[in-house]
Image (cartoon, coloured by chain):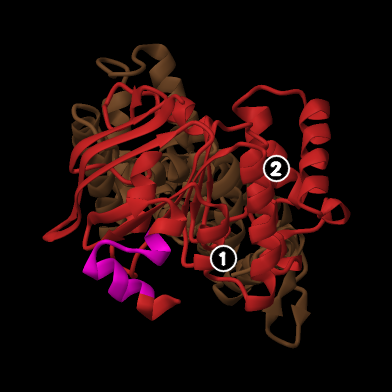
Chain colours: A red, B brown
Amino acid sequence: MDEVIRVERLRKRFGALEVLRGIDCVVRAGEVVCVIGPSGSGKSTFLRCLNGLEEASGGTVHVGGVSVHEARTDLDALRAEIGMVFQRFNLFPHKTVLENIVLAPTRVRGLSATRALGRARELLAKVGLLDKVDAYPNQLSGGQQQRVAIARALAMQPRIMLFDEPTSSLDPEMVGEVLAVMQALAEEGMTMVVVTHEMGFARQVADRVVFIDEGLVVEEGAPGALFDRPREDRTRRFLSKVI
Amino acid sequence: MEPLLWFGWFRADIIAEYALLFCRGLQMTITVTLICIVQGTGLGLAIGMARLAHTRHAPASLVCKYLLRWPSTVYVSFFRGTPLFVQILLMHFAVLPLLVNPSDGLLISGEAARSLKQNYGAFLSGVMALTLNAGAYISEIFRAGIQSIDRGQVEASRSLGLTHARTMYHVVLPQAFRRMLPPLGNNAISLLKDSSLISAIGLAEMAYAARTVAGAYSRYWEPYLTISLMYWVLTLGLAYLVKKLEARYGRGDTR
């Protein structure tokens, strides 16, 4: 399969703090990769380097063959192809659900309002929120907001979806509805990189799990192998705490 | 005119005699205030954005620093750090003659300059000084408003592929504007009151009308109390307007 993301020797410093210390990673088309690791291990920073939300301090990131951290790269065009879902949802509070979803397709893709609205409704039906089209984000529960955020990212018809701890700020009873939407997306063949603490989801949905600690990839492999027969001591210690 | 006394001491006839002067003054005060609010808001937005300009890669990052951030910071510092009254005097007696001058004006010279300065000199320099001053204060309101918006909003918008400008226009500024309404309203009220300072260079607005009347009759309570009431009514009206706007646009802000 084609590789869509290639990360080589990726480093990221915040002042004196070195968060990423040389990450290598390849993601192929249609693959679902879950990134796990303790808090502060650098997994979110890694994800944010993939679409240039963070600037790399060293190494390279190629997405779809385009080098992300280069001055002449058109980051806006690249980001239009990469959907991102955040821990804190980040819906636009002054816009309705529908307006949140159609903003980028109409402004970036130049879609007509009619077509964008039609597609937005399809996506809302898919995430089960067709009755909320005219609601404002603050009228929705966390789980509903996150599903809208997923629909908003999908409206750009991205080639890749990045998820940054999408269920970490949800009440426990809402985690399931968001994971279900993500699982359906994975089954449709979307290429996904998911930073998560949901080990059940990683085991069930991921094609590959990457364990990051202290800014390095400690171990990666198929979920069955990594969860049941971890090779590294550090992986074993981490898993014993979270499972 | 027969002296008309209210409450035994207030010479209402003086006010009646000069009613037209007060009305023209009122008109001028409102005109100057409106022009300065509009221009100051535009200028404030531009300066506020300039103060926040930054980019990752050289050489654009150097342009941002030395041609945008640095000059705008000095500008704001100067206009907030010196008295408005002094700025008005400086504008009228130093800057305007430099720009508009019959013999060697930088912008306009010759006969046109003479008549322009004679007829509109005080108006021009007053409006310029007040606009520049308001722009400095309003830019700080814009800057604070923009910076108060959660970083996640910009990140969400940029990761959808929207440019920086579109992110500002569609995502950040509409949210920031709601939060900026109360301080912008206070600023408009200050502007209205500060316009009285332009009377010092001879612009015939409300305070100037009062001074004229006071000089003619050597009576001070009547004219100054009258314009005080007029200012008060105007500021109350402005405050009411801002409250209405807040009620209309303040919804949907969750924070």
Residue B24 in view of the camera: no
Label 1 packing within 10 angstroms: few (<14), some (14-19), many (20+): many
For mark 1, give the secondary structure: loop
Mark 2, residue position = A101
Q: Residue furthest bottom?
A: B8
Residue A222 position, x and y percent, is 43, 51
Picture residue at 32% right of the left edge, 46% below the top: A54
| Residue A27 falls in image quadrant | top left
Q: Where is A33 relative to A139, above or below?
A: above
The single residue placed furthest to the right in the displayed view is A131
Q: Quadrant of residue B179?
A: bottom right
Q: Amino acid at mark 1?
A: Thr
Q: Are marks 2 and 1 in contact (CB under 8 Å)?
A: no
Q: Which of B212/B50 is in front?
A: B50
Q: What segment carries the magenta color? A: A226-239
Residue A190 vs A207, above or below: the answer is: above
A108 on left or right of A229? right
Residue B31 x %, y % = 62, 44
User: What chain letter is assigned to the residue under label 2?
Assistant: A
Q: Is residue B213 left or right of residue B141?
A: right
Element marked by disc 2: helix
A70, B64: nearer the viewer: A70
The residue carrying mark 1 is A167
How far apart marks 2 and 1 lie (CA) works out to 20 Å
Up the image or down, B3 lies above or below B215; here it is below
Q: Quadrant of the C terminus of chain A?
A: bottom left
Instruction: Give the mark toward the camera: 2 or 1.
Output: 1
Type of residue at label 2? Ile
